[in-house]
């Protein structure tokens, strides 16, 4: 605890950090479940995004990213090393990511493209609510390799496989809280 910070202020800063971290994790969920409504709810109306090959508003990001994601069979964005700095109603973070993308190459072969890097996010608290005001992606490495998935993914399989929409088991799981 910094000199001059009371316990209440330190606790409030920790809650702010947690709120921003939760936004980062929810954005990963929105991408992997292709949940456009969730993604749009995480950004302020005037927020921006810079993925290098895409630069624009958060709304334009949603318009661009979901058609692209739907061309893929599966994605999984894993997030780690989240560090958030808070200054009043503004916060900045760095979060490491490894994103797995199951897709088909030009010849139709099952491939996995893995991208790794960091998200540099800015957040603002407006009217008491934290949301993204800007996201930038910094890329560190990537790989493309043949997939080795050997699970039976047929309807007869006993496994519950993730889905890329509201039919994913997650949504029924969360609905339990509301009933």
Image: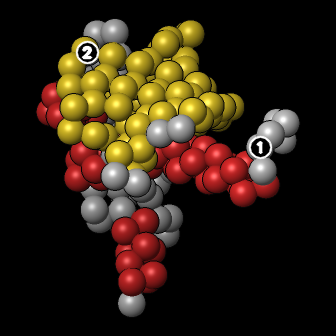
Label 2: how many residues lie within 10 Å, few (<14), some (14-19) or many (20+)? Answer: some
Question: In what element is the residue under mark 2?
Answer: loop
The mark total stands at 2
Image quarter where the C terminus lies is bottom left
Identify the residue at horizontal 80%, vertical 40% (top origin). Answer: 4
Mark 1 — residue? Answer: 5
Quick one: label 1 or label 2, which is nearer the N terminus? Answer: 1
In this view of the protein, which residue sits in the foreground, 2 or 60?
A: 2
Q: Mark 2 highlights which residue?
A: 54
The quarter of the picture where residue 132 lies is: top left
Q: Position of residue 88 (x, y in %)?
A: 53, 38
Above-or-below relation of 145 to 75: above
Disc 1 residue crowd, few under 14, some 14–19, many 20+, Cα 10 Å? few
Picture residue at 50% right of the left edge, 64% below the top: 159
Residue 79 versus residue 121 in the image, above or below? below
Return the x and y of residue 157 as percentages of the image width and height.
44, 65
Q: Marks 1 and 2, how far apart in space?
A: 41 Å
Toward which corner of the image does residue 45 lie, by quadrant? top left
Query: Residue 93: which disc?
Result: none
Query: 24 or 64: nearer the eye?
Result: 24
Q: Secondary structure at mark 1?
A: loop
Residue plotted at (16% across, 28% down): 60
Q: Residue furthest bottom?
A: 179
| Nearer to me, 167 or 8 | 8
Instruction: Assign the N terminus to one quadrant of the image.
Output: top right
Query: In the visual, does 4 lie left or right of 9?
Result: right
**Image position, residue 11 (x, y; %):** 71, 54
Residue 85 placement (x, y as % from top left): 62, 31
């Amino acid at each position: 605890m910094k000199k001059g910070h009371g316990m209440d202020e330190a606790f409030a800063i920790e809650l702010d950090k947690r709120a921003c971290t939760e936004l980062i994790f929810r954005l990963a969920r929105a991408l992997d479940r292709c949940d456009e409504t969730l993604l749009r709810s995480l950004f302020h109306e005037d927020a921006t995004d810079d993925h290098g090959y895409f630069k624009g508003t958060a709304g334009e990001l949603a318009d661009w990213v979901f058609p692209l994601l739907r061309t893929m069979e599966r994605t999984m964005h894993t997030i780690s090393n989240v560090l958030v700095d808070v200054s009043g109603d503004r916060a900045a973070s760095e979060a490491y990511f490894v994103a797995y993308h199951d897709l088909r190459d030009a010849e139709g072969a099952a491939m996995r493209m893995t991208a790794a890097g960091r998200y540099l996010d800015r957040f603002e608290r407006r009217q008491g609510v934290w949301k993204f005001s800007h996201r930038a992606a910094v890329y560190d490495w990537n790989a493309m390799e043949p997939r080795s998935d050997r699970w039976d993914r047929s309807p007869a399989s006993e496994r519950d496989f993730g889905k890329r929409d509201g039919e994913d088991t997650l949504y029924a799981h969360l609905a339990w809280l509301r009933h």
